[in-house]
Amino acid sequence: MPAHPSTPEAPALKRCFPPVVAADTRVLVLGSLPGEASLAAGQYYAYPHNQFWRLLGDVLGHDLVSLDYPARLQALLAQRIGLWDVVAEARRRGSLDVAIRDARQNDLVDFLASLPALRLVAFNGKTAARAAVQLQGMALHCLELPSSSPANTRAYAAKLQVWQQIDGWLRD
């Protein structure tokens, strides 16, 4: 119960998931912080209206949406794509990035240095892309993707056009 009836209780601390990467990861997609549905399911991009799995599936030419979660992750790793988030932990009411408070960032510099095959860091949305400043001076390419969140009302085809750039970074 709050200390004072008019003082709202602070939102619970929310933490990101562990990274999903392999030694040969070439593209790392960084989100901001998992939303409520993802946290409840313990899965990246679990909210059914989030277009993440559809977008990456269309980029790769695979139907990722119909796969179960472990198979989705395996499919990404097989294509040398990894996942993580820029925010390690934060307080947030709901799932919107604008509600993120008291954020502690993940140490991206050390983490990315541990991925020798990495070529591209792709930020899923503007909030995640703000972390690119941490990467200045690293010999990596960065790409800001339109958010796969349903809060981004940009047309699917317009989102996909930008997401398609990932494909070129996966090729030998």
Image (tube, rainbow, N blue to C red):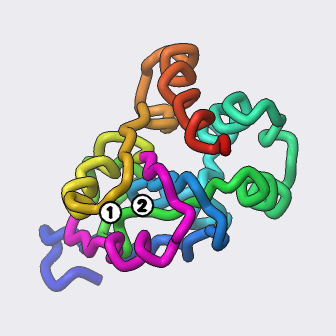
Say what amino acid the circle numbered 2 marks: Leu
- The x, y position of residue 156, in whole percent, is 56, 19
Query: Residue 43's image quarter?
Result: bottom right
Say what amino acid the circle numbered 1 marks: Arg
Please provide the residue range marked out in magenta: 101-122
- The x, y position of residue 72, in whole percent, is 78, 53
Question: Is 47 on the left-hand or right-hand side of 77?
Answer: left
Q: Please name the residue shown 51% across and 36% down the image.
A: 148
Question: Is 144 on the left-hand or right-hand side of 2?
Answer: right
What residue is shown with label 1?
Answer: 92
Task: State the SS at label 1.
Answer: loop
Where residue 10 is drawn, which disc sits there? none
Decide: is 62 above or below 129: above
Where residue 33 is drawn, which disc sits there? 2
Q: Residues within 10 Å of mark 1 (few under 14, many from 20)?
A: many
- The x, y position of residue 6, in whole percent, is 13, 68
Quadrant including the C terminus: top right
Cα distance between the residues tagged 2 and 1: 9 Å
Q: Residues within 10 Å of mark 2 (few under 14, many from 20)?
A: many
Residue 113 lies in magenta, yes or no? yes
